[in-house]
Amino acid sequence: MGRPSAGALISATKLPAEGKHFFSWDPERRRSPSPPWRRYATDRLIAVVLRIAADFARAHPHAPRLTIGDLSRPRGGAFAARYRPGLLHASHQNGLDVDIYYPRRDRRERAPARVGDIDLGLSQDLVDRFVRAGAQFVFVGLNTPLTGPRRVVQALPRHDNHLHVRLPPG
């Protein structure tokens, strides 16, 4: 309930630390798995992410598993960093936002460090899949050439290593 930047999460669902087609990534400690408190969302968002992860794996059997970053806290609300001061989400408060790290060209299962690490073809495929799944927004990095419908796919600062997906309320 509420807005992505001023909201709460009721009856949250926790994403497992990893699965056959995905693993969680902690952006603060730069390792897997992500702590449990960073892996909550609405059941609808979790279902969309897991379905896309499975479909993506079937379409690209040699691609790395999907790297899932932050979702929301168990009850939503402000999402501040514990280990890296200044790393703060302006959103991720109502369970409708998720960070998905771009697949790496070297297929390593970790977040890319720079744009040159990104497999742009696989990344564009992920953007397209989230657009088709009904994402309200897919935020991509300013230095990535990823595209889509202008009203949905938008370039933002600090998104050169991950896409940020937001589902519409409802």
Image: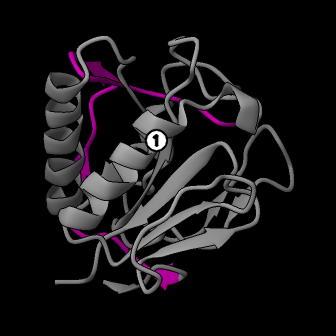
Count of marks placed on residues: 1
In the foreground, 61 or 48: 61
Mark 1 residue type: Ser
Please tell me whether residue 13 belongs to the stretch shown in magenta: yes
Q: Is residue 40 left or right of residue 25?
A: left
Residue at horizontal 34 percent and vertical 50 percent from the top:
40
Q: Is residue 22 left or right of residue 69?
A: left
Residue at horizontal 23 percent and vertical 35 percent from the top:
53
Q: Is residue 30 left or right of residue 77?
A: right
Label 1 Cα neighbours within 10 Å, binned few <14 / some 14-19 / many ≥20: many
Compared to residue 2, the image places residue 73 above or below, namely above
Residue at horizontal 39 percent and vertical 77 percent from the top:
149
Residue 5 occupies quadrant: bottom right
Please tell me whether residue 149 belongs to the stretch shown in magenta: no
Q: Position of residue 142 (x, y in %)?
A: 73, 62
In the foreground, 72 or 120: 120
In the foreground, 103 or 3: 103
Query: Quarter of the image containing the N terminus?
Result: bottom left
**Highlighted range, magenta:** 6-28
Type of secondary structure dominating the magenta stretch:
loop
Q: Position of residue 6 (x, y in %)?
A: 52, 85
Q: Is residue 92 left or right of residue 158?
A: left
Residue at horizontal 43 percent and vertical 48 percent from the top:
124
Compared to residue 83, the image places residue 33 above or below, namely above
Give the residue furthest to the right: 85
Let me know if residue 155 appears in the view. yes
Let me know if residue 11 appears in the view. no
Q: Position of residue 170 (x, y in %)?
A: 16, 84
Residue at the disc numbered 1: 123
Compared to residue 55, the image places residue 62 above or below, namely above
Q: Position of residue 137 (x, y in %)?
A: 41, 74
Dot 1 lies on which element?
helix
